[in-house]
Image: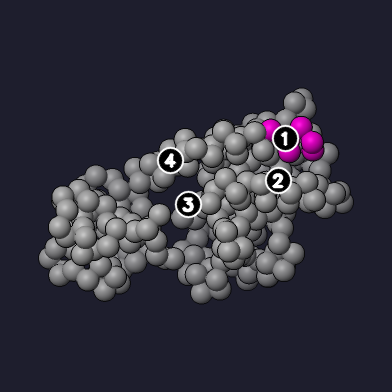
Amino acid sequence: MKPIAMDDAAESSPALKAFSLLEIVAGMDHPPTLAELTEAAGLPKPTLHRWLAMLEGADLLRRMPDGRRYELAARATALAFAILSNNSGSTQRHQILERVVRNLGESCNLTVLEGSEVMYLDRVEAAAPLRVAFQKGSRVPAHASASGKLFLAMMPPAKRDRLIGTLTLERHTANTLADAEALRAELGRIRQDRYAFDDEEFLSGLFCVAVPIFDRNGRDCIAALALQAPVVRVSRANAAEHLPSLREAAEALAVTLR
């Protein structure tokens, strides 16, 4: 979708003007400062302040803890999630997930990156009696999940370094990569291999393997497909066996997201 030009928005309703600014924030590869927004929008600071205040008041934008940068707020991310979950490709995506779960016998989820967290856009549970139940819309920290590490690894280096600098590397288990340098080393391996593991890094006893879903140009990782299973069934010893099926399904899912 082509963003609304600021010149066009200036001749439209106040709501459309504010929405055009929201599009600018959403399209930037990092939370922008007021100065960056002024340059990107080409607006006088008083006007920009007024629109930002309107969007903050509507819970569509929020200031980051440093008070200088802006990011999408809960209402905006909820709207984006609803659009992705209910657009014309959602049924087809769910059917693809169901097929890969039947094929592999383990739960799978489709994820997107939201700030410093991974959000489950869709999920299908396996029939196996021993499993960990997550819900559609669940969120997990990027640094402690296979999908999250995959998103970080596939980013342009400058964007990745900025995001890592904002992360709180909380330790969830003994295996969590809570050190920035250790995380960066892991991301280097993931970028080369194009798959990622979560080896009991978020929940003890849970193993996950994720593969990227690319845009139509094959460059940007726009989503991820991940398999989750208890370590008694899937581990580093046998996880690679699932990669061909996951990658095939990821290619099919990519078509529904374009």
Q: Is residue 140 left or right of residue 7?
A: right
Question: Was residue 251 drawn as part of the magenta stretch in this picture?
Answer: no
Picture quadrant of residue 220: bottom right
Element carrying mark 4: helix
- Check whether the beta carbons of the residues at disc 1 and disc 2 lie within 8 A of each other: yes
Inter-mark Cα distance, 1 to 3: 26 Å
Can residue 43 be seen in the rendering of this structure? yes
Name the residue at 15% across, 57% down. Answer: 11
| Mark 2, other Cα within 10 Å: few <14 / some 14–19 / many ≥20 | some
Question: Label 4 belongs to which residue?
Answer: 83
Can residue 71 be seen in the rendering of this structure? no
Residue extending furthest toward the right: 237
Q: Position of residue 68 (x, y in %)?
A: 29, 66
State the extent of the magenta-drawn residues as a range: 98-104
Name the residue at 85% across, 49% down. Answer: 241
Element carrying mark 3: strand
Residue kind at label 4, given as amino acid type: Ile
Q: Is residue 14 left or right of residue 236?
A: left
Residue extending furthest toward the left: 46
Name the residue at 57% across, 59% down. Answer: 216
If you read the primary sequence from the N terminus, does the residue marked by circle 2 or circle 4 appear first? 4
| Mark 1, other Cα within 10 Å: few <14 / some 14–19 / many ≥20 | few
- Check whether the beta carbons of the residues at disc 4 and disc 3 lie within 8 A of each other: no
Inter-mark Cα distance, 2 to 3: 22 Å
24 vs 231: above or below: below
Q: Which mark is residue 209?
A: none
- Check whether the beta carbons of the residues at disc 2 and disc 4 lie within 8 A of each other: no
| Mark 3, other Cα within 10 Å: few <14 / some 14–19 / many ≥20 | some
Name the residue at 53% across, 45% down. Answer: 119
Inter-mark Cα distance, 4 to 3: 14 Å
Question: Label 1 belongs to which residue?
Answer: 99
Q: Which mark is residue 249?
A: 2
